[in-house]
Image (cartoon, coloured by chain):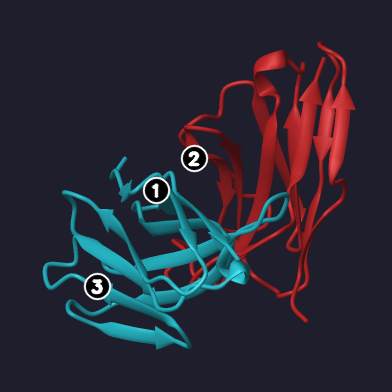
Chain colours: A cyan, B red
Amino acid sequence: TQLLEQSPQFLSIQEGENLTVYCNSSSVFSSLQWYRQEPGEGPVLLVTVVTGGEVKKLKRLTFQFGDARKDSSLHITAAQPGDTGLYLCAGDSGYALNFGKGTSLLVTP
Amino acid sequence: DVKVTQSSRYLVKRTGEKVFLECVQDMDHENMFWYRQDPGLGLRLIYFSYDVKMKEKGDIPEGYSVSREKKERFSLILESASTNQTSMYLCASSSHPRGRYGYTFGSGTRLTVV
């Protein structure tokens, strides 16, 4: 199983701050995905990145795929309480998606 | 609005019971997956199916089986529930067999085995 390591594990910030979370692996992925999961719900797909060096923006969220396609980052600008949740990265394991353990983000007003 | 529907949000079962978790999708996807999610362990793949009548073991299949008699329905079966199967169970479907374009997840079933 190709491991995806996410950091930090937990993050608690105040509204308006910026943050970056990371997803790293020793394996090369054909694509990586980011999901957000709210308590008691299933994960929801935010973005898929497929090309090394690719940058995608979703409102205040910026996703980057590493040049070597082994890592990815998620940057949130001016975080809001609605951004609170568990952020998961996922990559193709060869037969299904393999998920990192996630970064739990808490944004307080 | 496309959906993956899991039949129960919360279940409490006794040790030794046979438990059925149902999952239905309305997106005409061929590919369906069952994961369990536990604190500190993340999401782990139990079983998956690329087509009707087809099933494959994932990373942690022990103690589980599945059924896929219709394209839209993928059921997870706990043959004899044990306390270590207390977990959040997530069903997902995908248009690509390896999820290249993303999964759509259900809302999950929180199972407690007592």
Vertical comparison of A62 with B87: above or below: below
Is residue A8 or residue A1 the one in the foreground?
A: A8
Residue drawn 35% across and 72% down? A75
A87 left or right of A108 in image: left
Residue drawn 37% across and 71% down? A18
Tell me where residue A60 sits by quadrant.
bottom left
Residue B27, position in %: x, y?
A: 71, 75
Question: What residue is shown with label 2?
Answer: B42
Question: Label 1 near label 2: C-beta < 8 Å?
Answer: yes
Give the number of the disc on residue A65: 3
Residue drawn 31% across and 48% down? A4
The type of residue carrying mark 3 is: Phe
Is residue B94 or residue A108 the one in the foreground?
A: A108
In the picture as drawn, the residue positioned furthest to the top comes out as B16
B53 left or right of B111 in image: left
B44 left or right of B8 in image: left
Is residue B97 or residue A27 the one in the foreground?
A: A27
The type of residue carrying mark 1 is: Gly
Give the number of the disc on residue A100: 1
A61 left or right of A66 in image: right
Residue A62, position in %: x, y?
A: 36, 80
Q: Residues within 10 Å of mark 1 (few under 14, many from 20)?
A: many
Residue B106, position in %: x, y?
A: 72, 58
For the residues beneath circles 1 and 3, the answer to whether they share a chain is yes
